[in-house]
């Protein structure tokens, strides 16, 4: 058992922390959010240069062969700074390519992801699916030497900024069945792809994507036909563990800034932090954040080392339950303890509130993971 | 970072697990499983088995019989004891009085008392709280007046856990009524056979006799039983607070309770033959407790890891106390709830014997009632929050 970061992990953590501190303060972020694209190419290149995108990719694919633990402190820093560039969506899509792709597919795509020249997104969620990963209705029909995709994906994180889409499609069976799901590589600008991009409540970019007779070649299929669900589950668990780490960073910021406010804001002639009723609520936020940190460590460690899918999924669900509950508690309390000021657009804590609120539901809310945990626990 | 135990740590865990399996007497195992109270003899018998093995005082220096384990091994040992359902090592001797003497005791005091503590020959109890001094412990009024080569102690202690078994009691007493409140307090060791001491039981709502009132009426205590300096008792007490409860999270014991609760809930059927554990309303409450426990285990290990360099524990202990006791209480509550209407029949705690219903079920409601103590004792959870607010958050 060892809690210290390795030398590489520590250096990454320090350099990304320093960079975001200097170059991604609240005002700079605001300018990025309000820009046309809603994300900064310069920031993207810089994060790529630090290795954030290459770390989780296998060495064969031009990456560093790292895992969630290696990215954990980077994700915390991203959460604290509320980075809106689509790191996690790209890491998720790239993992699918890395895990399922042929040598040729990996060689074509992943080095460009690692160096920041290509962005990717995983187009998966559909209407009526909620968080069920097997609920894929978009169809892929075999035609001659390729496939034709028809259907609609919803709220695809990072899609408006992506060059490449990894699309889940049904090649057999009905929406909801575990067998018959396949993955395809589709250029974001391919004929028949029509994307409606928008800003999310937490100032990220997402899109609804209609696929209308989108023709792809046979070699656009990623992995074995009809066998994609376990690959998707693994990649989503990996991304969920990283999301937990991001949440911990955001919680830490919310707590730090709230504590600072309690010490400086005066009412009745004294700092409001002298009131025991507020102290105890702040303590609960602190304890919750520490518990969240612990379980995010557990999830990241587990996705890196688990040899059994059920064991991995069980721990990731446990983590997401705790993180989802903690996101709600800390986001809500941080606003309440700030009073009216916490409600305003001009305070960063209101943005952290929105991010934590969405993290609580991303890749499954607490209820979803309570169900999955119970099912896996027997 | 690697949250898995090293091969050496795993081998140690297996060694402890195997030894506990072979050496925990069956009758004590059964009492643990049924949630029965242990007698003095039970507690000391287990203490002596561990002492003989050299494992009874994990945190003591090797010079005095400690096994020389690092914090991780100590945690593993505690966890395995919890998982096996052993009787507790009564903390007042080994963990509390022992640690105090090791830190503050004179050579004579160490030589006189440590072997008896180690071997389980002397049963120690703690005299801290008083009727008027609970959370505000430093307001205590039991006074010790110096008369020549002894003190004369008068006053009353309360909530004296297992005081009915006590051979010796360590007490906080007021030696200087004129000093500021913390500064007039001293730490005194008192032989409970001394004339003038009366122990009166307080029966708790589970029917058990666990705590007592202890009255001191002109009790003569030799001056040599003063630990550290006169008026420095509060320093000793504060030191003890940190060392008292590194095991305060009671992770191993709660894991065992959780496993038992799951097994129990899997056997409870509703009228339609559905298992309680499959009822989503019940199951979700149970899962949230399990998740909190999973997180607390890592939190506990993180704190221990941070102490490897010898840093003394700080307000982290308060956090373990709060969450650890909340988990214990939630588990006992869910277990009682799992029994449904069968929770009602009463079997007084600590009294075995023929009962017309199964012993496990009969113990659940008393145990639930008993465990309300955990968020009150050893510094209420509200006091723990005050400590974190002040020491960690700077409020």
Image (spheres, rainbow, N blue to C red):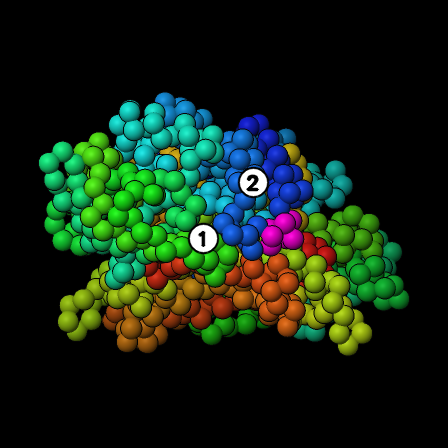
Q: Of residues A139 and A182, which is closer to you in this image? A: A139
Residue at position x 74%, y 44% in the image: B104
Q: Numbered disc 2: what chain?
A: A
Mark 1 or 2 closer to N-term?
2
Front in this rendered view, residue A292 or A117:
A117
What residue sits 42% from the left and 39% below the top?
A119
In the image, residue A69 above or below residue B229: above
At 15% from the left edge and 71% from the top edge, which residue is drawn? Answer: B272
* Residue A269 in which image quadrant: bottom right
Taking A124 as reference, is A17 above or below it?
Answer: above
Q: Is residue A62 shown in magenta?
A: no
| Image quadrant in which the C terminus of chain B is located | bottom right
Q: Where is residue B360 in the image (x, y as percent from the top left)?
A: 31, 63
Say whether marks 1 and 2 touch (CB < 8 Å).
no
Question: Alpha-carbon neighbours of circle 1 within 10 Å: few (<14), some, or many (≥20)?
Answer: many
The boundaries of the magenta stretch are A25-31
Label 1 sits on a secondary structure element that is strand
- Which residue: 73% across, 62% down? A263
Provide the residue designation for mark 2. A43
Can residue B298 be seen here? no
Q: Quadrant of residue B17?
A: top left
């Amino acid at each position: 058992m060892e809690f210290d970061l390795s030398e590489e992990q520590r250096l990454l953590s320090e350099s990304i922390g320093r960079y975001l501190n200097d170059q991604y303060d609240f005002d700079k972020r605001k300018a990025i959010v309000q820009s046309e694209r809603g994300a900064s190419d310069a920031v993207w290149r810089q994060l790529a240069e630090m290795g954030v995108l290459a770390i989780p990719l296998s060495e064969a694919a031009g990456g560093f062969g790292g895992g969630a633990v290696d990215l954990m402190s980077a994700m915390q820093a991203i959460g604290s700074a509320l980075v809106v560039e689509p790191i996690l969506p790209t890491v998720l899509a790239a993992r699918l390519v890395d895990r399922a792709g042929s040598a040729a597919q990996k060689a074509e795509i992943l080095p460009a992801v690692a160096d920041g020249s290509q962005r990717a997104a995983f187009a998966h969620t559909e209407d009526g699916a909620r968080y069920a990963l097997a609920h894929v209705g978009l169809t892929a029909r075999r035609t001659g030497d390729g496939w034709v995709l028809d259907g609609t994906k919803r709220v695809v994180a990072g899609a408006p900024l992506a060059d490449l889409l990894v699309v889940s499609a049904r090649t057999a069976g009905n929406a909801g069945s575990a067998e018959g799901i396949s993955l395809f590589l589709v250029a974001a600008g391919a004929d028949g792809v029509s994307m409606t991009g928008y800003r999310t409540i937490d100032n990220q970019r997402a899109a609804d994507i209609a696929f209308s007779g989108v023709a792809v070649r046979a070699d656009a299929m990623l992995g074995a036909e009809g066998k994609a669900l376990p690959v998707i589950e693994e990649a989503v668990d990996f991304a969920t563990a990283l999301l937990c780490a991001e949440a911990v960073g955001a919680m830490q910021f919310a707590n730090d800034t709230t504590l600072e406010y309690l010490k400086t804001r005066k009412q009745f002639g004294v700092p409001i932090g002298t009131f025991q009723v507020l102290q105890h609520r702040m303590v609960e936020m602190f304890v919750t954040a520490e518990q969240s940190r612990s379980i995010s460590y557990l999830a990241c460690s587990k996705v890196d080392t688990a040899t059994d899918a059920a064991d991995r999924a069980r721990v990731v669900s446990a983590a997401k339950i705790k993180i989802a509950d903690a996101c709600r508690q800390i986001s809500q309390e941080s606003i309440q303890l700030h009073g009216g000021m916490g409600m305003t657009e001009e305070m960063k804590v209101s943005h952290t509130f929105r991010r934590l609120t969405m993290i609580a539901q991303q890749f499954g809310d607490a209820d979803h993971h309570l169900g999955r945990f119970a099912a896996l626990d027997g | 970072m690697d949250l898995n135990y090293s091969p050496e740590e795993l081998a140690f865990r297996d060694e402890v697990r195997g030894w506990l399996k072979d050496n925990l007497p069956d009758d004590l195992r059964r009492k643990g499983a049924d949630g029965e109270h242990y007698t003095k003899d039970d507690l000391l018998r287990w203490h002596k088995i561990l002492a003989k093995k050299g494992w009874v005082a994990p945190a003591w220096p090797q010079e005095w019989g400690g096994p020389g384990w690092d914090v991780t091994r100590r945690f593993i040992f505690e966890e395995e004891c919890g998982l096996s359902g052993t009787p507790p090592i009564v903390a007042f001797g080994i963990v509390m009085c022992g640690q105090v003497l090791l830190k503050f005791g004179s050579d004579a005091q160490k030589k006189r008392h440590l072997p008896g503590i180690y071997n389980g020959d002397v049963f120690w109890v703690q005299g801290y709280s008083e009727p008027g001094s609970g959370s505000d412990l430093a307001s205590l009024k039991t006074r010790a007046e110096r008369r020549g080569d002894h003190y004369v102690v008068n006053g009353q202690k309360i909530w004296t856990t297992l005081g009915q078994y006590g051979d010796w009691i360590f007490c906080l007493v007021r030696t200087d009524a004129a000093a500021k409140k913390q500064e007039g307090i001293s730490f005194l060791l008192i032989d409970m056979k001394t004339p003038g001491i009366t122990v009166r039981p307080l029966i708790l709502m589970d029917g058990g006799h666990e705590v007592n009132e202890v009255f001191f009426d002109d009790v003569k205590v030799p001056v040599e039983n003063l630990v550290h300096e006169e008026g420095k008792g509060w320093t000793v007490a504060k030191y003890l607070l940190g060392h008292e409860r590194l095991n305060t999270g009671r992770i191993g014991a709660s894991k065992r309770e959780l496993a038992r609760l799951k097994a129990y809930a899997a056997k409870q059927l509703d009228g339609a033959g559905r298992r309680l554990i499959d009822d989503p309303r019940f199951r979700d409450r149970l899962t949230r407790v399990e998740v909190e426990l999973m997180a607390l285990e890592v939190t506990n290990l993180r704190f221990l890891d941070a102490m490897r360099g010898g840093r003394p524990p700080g307000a982290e202990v308060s956090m373990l106390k709060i969450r650890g006791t909340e988990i214990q209480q939630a588990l006992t509550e869910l277990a009682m709830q799992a029994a449904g209407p069968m929770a009602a029949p009463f079997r007084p705690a600590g009294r075995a014997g023929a009962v017309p219903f199964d012993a496990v079920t009969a113990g659940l409601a008393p145990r639930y009632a008993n465990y309300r103590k955990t968020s009150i004792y050893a510094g209420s959870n509200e006091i723990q929050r005050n400590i974190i607010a002040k020491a960690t958050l700077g409020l």
